Image (tube, grey):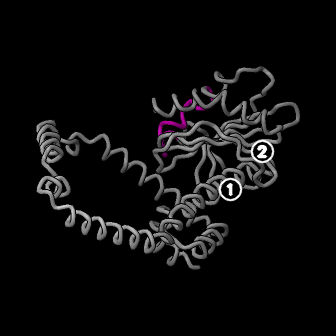
């Protein structure tokens, strides 16, 4: 894949609309092209900023008077007798039976036609989540363990100016939320792995290296921290918030890794909301 081909696909890639084979080609290209990784990071940041701007724009908010009219129209529509109710009111059960038969045939046809695409959509969502987890584990391994990132990390304060306020003070949020003194702070920065930018706080627990990773996403789903088992040989716990994903990756026992994620999750959620 060339850089020009990647740039034609970048919006579809960010939106998780590509086939699995094409995704593999894109990831292979990103692994060897720093320019396209930067382009991908910029694209994701632009989409996030645009979504926030639209959501916060006074010009795009629903007019209260329109909302009242819409609610009243929907109420009236709900109170108007439906065709089904009218059929039974006029005592025409044979017509109703015919309608039921048509509806059942149509419903069965829809289920048959759309079964495979629906399964594909679920598969695509799982694939997107799996990709995000793999990127987080790759960042932990290549940044906190082997120091093999292709791009030099930048301070959180610099990332806050360039990419979003949530980077600023995230290290202090994590430090304040730690419920045990057994964790030693190593460093905090923002780094990029395979085009995905993370806020990265590195801790140590004895001789175990622990990565706290936070990254922007398009999701609005919120989940409690969940252990994902072993990814790349590292115990991994993850949770989703509004427009962000949070990971704890380490060599700790899985339950201890999950406990740390649960300890940090409320503070990180509060930090992201305030930012």
Q: Position of residue 218 (x, y in %)?
A: 47, 51
Left or right of 169, for residue 103: left
User: Mark 2 sits on what residue?
Assistant: 235
Q: Is residue 21 above or below residue 46?
A: below
**Could you give the CA–CA distance between mark 2 and mark 1, rounded to whole angstroms?**
12 Å
Name the secondary structure under disc 1.
helix
Q: Which residues are magenta?
A: 160-172
Name the secondary structure under disc 2.
strand
What residue appears at the point 41 percent right and 70 percent down from the top-left corner? 108
Q: Is residue 169 magenta?
A: yes
What residue appears at the point 11 percent right and 41 percent down from the top-left corner? 69
Nearer to me, 108 or 237: 108
What residue appears at the point 53 percent right and 66 percent down from the top-left corner? 119
Q: Position of residue 22 (x, y in %)?
A: 57, 75
Check disc 1: other Cα within 10 Å, few if <14, some if 14-19, many if 20+: some
The image quarter containing residue 30 is bottom right
User: Mark 1 sits on what residue?
Assistant: 134
Nearer to me, 258 or 250: 258
Sequence-first disc among 2 and 1? 1
Q: Position of residue 207 (x, y in %)?
A: 88, 35
């Amino acid at each position: 894949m060339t850089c020009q081909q990647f740039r034609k696909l970048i919006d579809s890639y960010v939106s998780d609309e590509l086939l699995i084979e094409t995704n593999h080609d894109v990831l292979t290209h990103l692994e060897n092209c720093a320019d396209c990784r930067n382009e991908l990071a910029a694209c994701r940041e632009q989409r996030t900023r645009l979504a926030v701007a639209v959501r916060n724009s006074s010009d795009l908010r629903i007019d209260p008077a329109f909302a009242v009219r819409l609610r009243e129209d929907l109420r009236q529509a709900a109170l108007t007798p439906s065709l089904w109710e009218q059929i039974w009111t006029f005592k025409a059960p044979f017509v109703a039976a015919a309608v039921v038969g048509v509806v059942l045939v149509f419903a069965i046809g829809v289920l048959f036609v759309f079964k495979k695409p629906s399964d594909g959509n679920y598969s695509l969502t799982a694939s997107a989540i799996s990709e995000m987890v793999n990127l987080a584990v790759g960042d932990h391994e290549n940044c906190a363990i082997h120091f093999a990132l292709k791009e030099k990390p930048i301070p959180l304060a610099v990332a806050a100016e360039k990419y979003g306020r949530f980077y600023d003070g995230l290290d202090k949020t994590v430090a304040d939320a730690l419920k045990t003194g057994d964790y030693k702070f190593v460093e905090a920065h923002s780094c990029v792995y395979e085009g995905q930018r993370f806020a990265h706080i590195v801790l140590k627990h004895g001789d175990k290296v622990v990565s706290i990773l936070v990254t922007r996403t398009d999701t609005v789903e919120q989940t409690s921290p969940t252990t994902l088992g072993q990814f790349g040989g590292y115990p991994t716990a993850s949770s989703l918030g509004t427009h962000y994903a949070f990971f704890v990756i380490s060599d700790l026992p899985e339950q201890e890794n999950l406990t740390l994620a649960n300890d940090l999750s409320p503070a990180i959620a509060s930090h992201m909301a305030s930012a």
